[in-house]
Each structure stands twice: as C-alpha cells, then as structure tokens.
Image (cartoon, coloured by chain):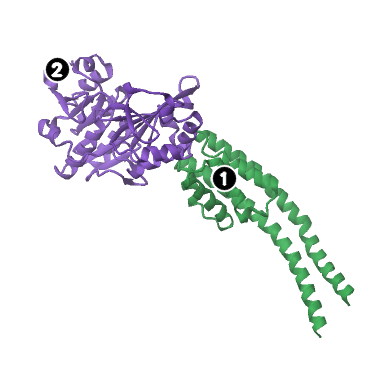
Chain colours: A green, B purple
C-alpha cells in the first residue's frame, strides 16, 4: 500500500515539476509585459510631469516587478549613479531571475540610460526600448506556445516511466 | 549643517562631504573647479579649505596638496547627483548655466556647451561649479519696508551676492503676514520659496507662490486669477516688459530685482531703462555692494529722467 502511495506521490511530483516549468514561461511573459508597461508609463510621466528617476521608480507599483523598482529607487536614494543603481537592482531582484541573460541585459541597458539626456532624448530612448521589448515578449509567447505542451506531456511521461521502472 | 546642504555635499565623494560637514563657519558660496583647490566664501571673503576642515585665506596659499581638491570625474558624478540623475528635469536650467536644487541653493555651472543652430542644447564636461547657499533671514526686510513705499512699486538693484533674493523672500513673507497684503510670488527657478513637492522650505507667510512659471506668464496669470495687491519676482529682464505693463494697467504693485550696481549703469542698460519707462516702479533701491540686504540709495522715479 505504502509503495503505491509513494508511486502516486512521485507521479504527482513529476507533474508539478512540469507545471512549474510551464508557470515560469507564463511569469516570463508577465514580467516582460510589466517592464513594457513601466517603459510606457515612464515615457508619459517624463513628457508630462518630468519627475525625477527616484520618483518614477518609487511610484511604479506593479507587483510583478515591484522588487526591481524598489531596489533601483533605494539604490538611487543611497546615492548610487543611475547606471550602478540599475545594474545592482537587476542583479539582486529575484523577480527577474527567470529572464534570460539577453533579456536582463536589455532591461539593464534600457533603464540605465534613463536620466542622462533631455526630455526628447528620453522619450525616443523609451520609444525605442518599447519597440525592442515587443520582440522579447513575442519570443516569450512563442516559446510558451512551443514548450508549454512539451513540458506538461514530458512531465506525465517521465512520471509514468519512473512508476513503471519502480514497479 | 542644513539638511539640504548636506544633500548637496553628499553628491561628491565621502571625503569632501566630511570636510565640508566639519566646517563650522557660515558659508555663502562654494566654488569648485576640477582638479583645483575648493574655495569657500565666508562673509564674501574667499578661503581655501584644508583637509582638516580648516580655512586659509587665499593670499596665504601653500602647496596644492594641502587643500581639498575635487577631481573632474568626481565633479561629473556630483553633477549627475545634483540633477537627481534626471538631466531631463533640469535641462532648461542647465542650458541657462545653472540649476536650483532643494533648499533654493543655486548652482552655477561652467563646462562645454553643445550648440544647435541658435541655442545651447546642452552643457557637458562640467569643469566649474559655484554653489550659492540660500538662506532665510527673517526680519531682514524691516528696515527696507520702513524706508520705501510699496504702493509705488519697487525695483531693487544690486550686484550678485548683495542679498536681492533673500530680501525678496523676506519682503514676501512680511507683506503677506504682517501687512496683510495679497502677495503673489513668481518663482521661476524655485529660488525664492524653494518649493518641492508643493511645500516651501522657507517661511513664505501667506503668499501665493507660482513655482516654475516664467515671469511673464506667471505675472499675467497671477493678475487674472489671484487678484494680488503685490507681485514679487526676481531678476526681471527686457523680455518681461509686456507683463510689467500689464501690472501697471491693472494697478497691481510690482516688487522686482535686477542686476545693476548704480543709477548710471541702470540708465545705460536698455532693458532696465525700458522697465523704468513702464512706470511700474516708483522707487529704485540700490543695495550696498559689499554688505548683505542693506540699502545704499533710494531714487524716486520722478527724480530720474527716463522718458
């Protein structure tokens, strides 16, 4: 009896692993979309209200990248340059850990250039970043479409194979 | 040391911050030039600062290594920090050669201009900075108010560092609070009131403060919307003539400042002359050049031939 319960537990565990991989794909899209929305909001705010970078980052309250924006605003408040604040913020935010190296580099690159030029420069920088992030979002959606089923099916099969082997 | 000043010095390296924090004197100005000894002004007299926060008069210059020096790289970083890492917010001011930071302190900058066809587009490679420390001396306008007639409109003239803005600040506070006047302050660079996030760092009494409005737009808006008795603004130029005429037409009294050291040079200056010709100022007050907020001479407009 215990053996069968153990096998059932292994099977469920295997499905959960597949599910968590699938969730990662969903989260990745969610985070990239949040970053896009941040870039768009920054563009509007800079054009209309011209707040400082500290205000911009501390006023952005989207849950999925809250840790990132909080880290960056704290770094800025502690007197780090905007570039160092962003690099440090991206490095120490667990919310962006699931992103690829290239995606993280893109975010660091786009955000660290903020505050370094006049309003027109900032707006074109943000417009450009929004265009570029669309590419990463599309890739992530495509990645999810391709791999989501694969992860789920593989997790079921792997679970079954383990059960057969153990039986 | 004032928190706003600490914030300024904090933008530089820690050593500079500590040295400045330990200076016990009342500083008027700090002049920082890249890779050169920092000079501070106390009661309008220049001094070098040693690494132990002692001050040495300029004429007793020793070897350069004895004094506090800010490097070009540190100056560049500090400038970004002073702009709150948000150059876009300060771009217009930067193009005009200065920024005003929290506390109303004005920081003059000098570097390399990037020009487009007819304007300065940006200033890069900052090599010198002049931090002018804003202060509030409550009551410094009392003697001024006793000797002048606000109802005639007043043009305050003086060379830099004679306390024009400090005087305006106290005049605004006193007129609105003690004399129950409706005072609108047009604070184009947030220097008079030092307003940040809707709060003024200085006591501005019961003034209505138009922050970051250009003088000409601010004056017209104030007249249209706030029915002021008196409008106060700093550093008028010839570009503001139309709005000054507007105050005359609506019977609003104007108290303003201009850069000028004596009546002769005022009358030779086309923009000051055109301001006087509007008859918005019944009295022209000159401030003493080597003291602070002290009246040197008062002229009545009818005694001067301006037309």
Q: As drawn, is B77 to the left or to the right of A21?
A: left
Locate residue B8, reporting x and y percent. Answer: 40, 39
Residue A60, above or below B298: below
Locate residue A138, reporting x and y percent. Answer: 70, 49
CA distance for labels 1 and 2:
61 Å
Question: Going 61% across and 38% down the picture, which residue do you hit?
Answer: A128
Question: Going 51% across and 47% down the picture, which residue do you hit?
Answer: A75
Foreground pick, B296 / B256: B296
Query: Which residue is the extreme one toward the bottom?
Result: A1
Locate residue A117, reporting x and y percent. Answer: 52, 34
> Tags 1 and 2 in contact by the CB under 8 Å rule?
no
Secondary structure beneath label 2: loop
Locate residue A33, reporting x and y percent. Answer: 62, 51
Q: As drawn, is B248 to the left or to the right of B102?
A: left
Q: Quadrant of residue B62?
A: top left
Q: Using the image, name the chain to which the residue with label 2 belongs.
A: B
How many marks the image carries: the answer is: 2
Foreground pick, B29 / B171: B29
Task: Please state which of the two labelled residues, at mark 1 or mark 2, is closer to the viewer.
Answer: 1
- Write down the residue under mark 1: A86
How dense is the environment of label 1, judged by Cα within 10 Å: few (below 14), some, or many (20 and up)?
Answer: many
Q: Using the image, name the chain to which the residue with label 1 belongs.
A: A
In which quadrant of the rendered image does the C terminus of chain B lie?
Answer: top left
Q: Do the dots labelled 1 and 2 sit on one chain? A: no
Q: Residue A127 has which mark? A: none
- Write down the residue under mark 2: B304
Secondary structure beneath label 1: helix
In which quadrant of the rendered image does the N terminus of chain B lie?
Answer: top left
How dense is the environment of label 2, judged by Cα within 10 Å: few (below 14), some, or many (20 and up)?
Answer: few
Foreground pick, B159 / B215: B159
Question: Going 26% across and 16% down the picture, which residue do you hit?
Answer: B269
């Amino acid at each position: 009896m215990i053996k069968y319960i153990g096998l059932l537990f292994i099977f469920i565990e295997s499905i959960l692993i597949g599910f968590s991989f699938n969730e990662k794909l969903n989260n990745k899209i969610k985070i990239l979309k949040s970053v896009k929305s941040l870039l768009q909001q920054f563009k509007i705010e800079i054009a209309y209200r011209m707040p400082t970078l500290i205000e911009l980052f501390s006023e952005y309250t989207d849950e999925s990248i809250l840790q990132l924006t909080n880290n960056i605003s704290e770094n800025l408040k502690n007197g780090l340059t905007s570039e160092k604040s962003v690099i440090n913020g991206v490095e120490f935010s667990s919310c962006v850990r699931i992103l690829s190296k290239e995606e993280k580099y893109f975010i660091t690159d786009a955000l660290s250039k903020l505050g370094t030029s006049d309003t027109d420069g900032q707006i074109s920088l943000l417009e450009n970043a929004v265009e570029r992030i669309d590419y990463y979002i599309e890739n992530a959606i495509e990645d999810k479409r391709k791999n989501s089923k694969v992860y789920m099916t593989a997790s079921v099969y792997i679970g079954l194979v383990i059960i057969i082997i153990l039986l | 040391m004032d928190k706003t000043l600490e914030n300024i010095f904090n933008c530089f390296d820690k050593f500079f911050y500590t040295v400045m924090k330990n200076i016990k004197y009342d500083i008027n100005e700090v002049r920082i030039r890249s890779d050169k000894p920092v000079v501070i002004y106390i009661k309008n007299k220049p001094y070098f600062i040693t690494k132990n926060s002692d001050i040495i008069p300029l004429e007793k210059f020793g070897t350069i290594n004895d004094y506090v020096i800010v490097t070009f790289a540190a100056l560049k970083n500090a400038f970004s920090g002073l702009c709150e890492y948000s150059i876009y917010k300060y771009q217009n001011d930067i193009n005009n050669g200065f920024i005003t930071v929290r506390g109303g302190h004005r920081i003059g900058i000098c570097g390399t201009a990037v020009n487009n066809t007819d304007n300065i587009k940006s200033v890069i490679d900052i090599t010198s900075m002049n931090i002018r420390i804003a202060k509030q001396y409550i009551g410094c306008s009392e003697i001024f108010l006793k000797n002048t007639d606000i109802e005639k409109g007043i043009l305050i003239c003086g060379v830099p560092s004679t306390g024009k803005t400090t005087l305006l600040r106290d005049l605004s506070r006193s007129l609105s609070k003690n004399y129950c006047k409706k005072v609108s302050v047009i604070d184009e660079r947030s220097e008079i009131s030092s307003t940040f996030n809707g709060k003024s760092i200085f006591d501005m009494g019961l003034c209505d403060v138009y922050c970051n409005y250009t003088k000409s737009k601010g004056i017209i808006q104030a007249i249209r919307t706030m029915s002021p008795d008196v409008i106060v603004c700093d550093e008028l130029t010839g570009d503001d003539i139309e709005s000054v005429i507007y105050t005359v037409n609506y019977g609003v009294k104007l108290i303003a400042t201009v850069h000028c050291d004596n009546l002769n040079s005022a009358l030779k200056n086309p923009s000051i002359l055109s301001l006087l010709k509007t008859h918005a100022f019944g009295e022209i007050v000159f401030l003493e050049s080597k003291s602070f907020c002290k009246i040197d001479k008062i002229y009545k407009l009818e005694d001067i031939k301006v037309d």
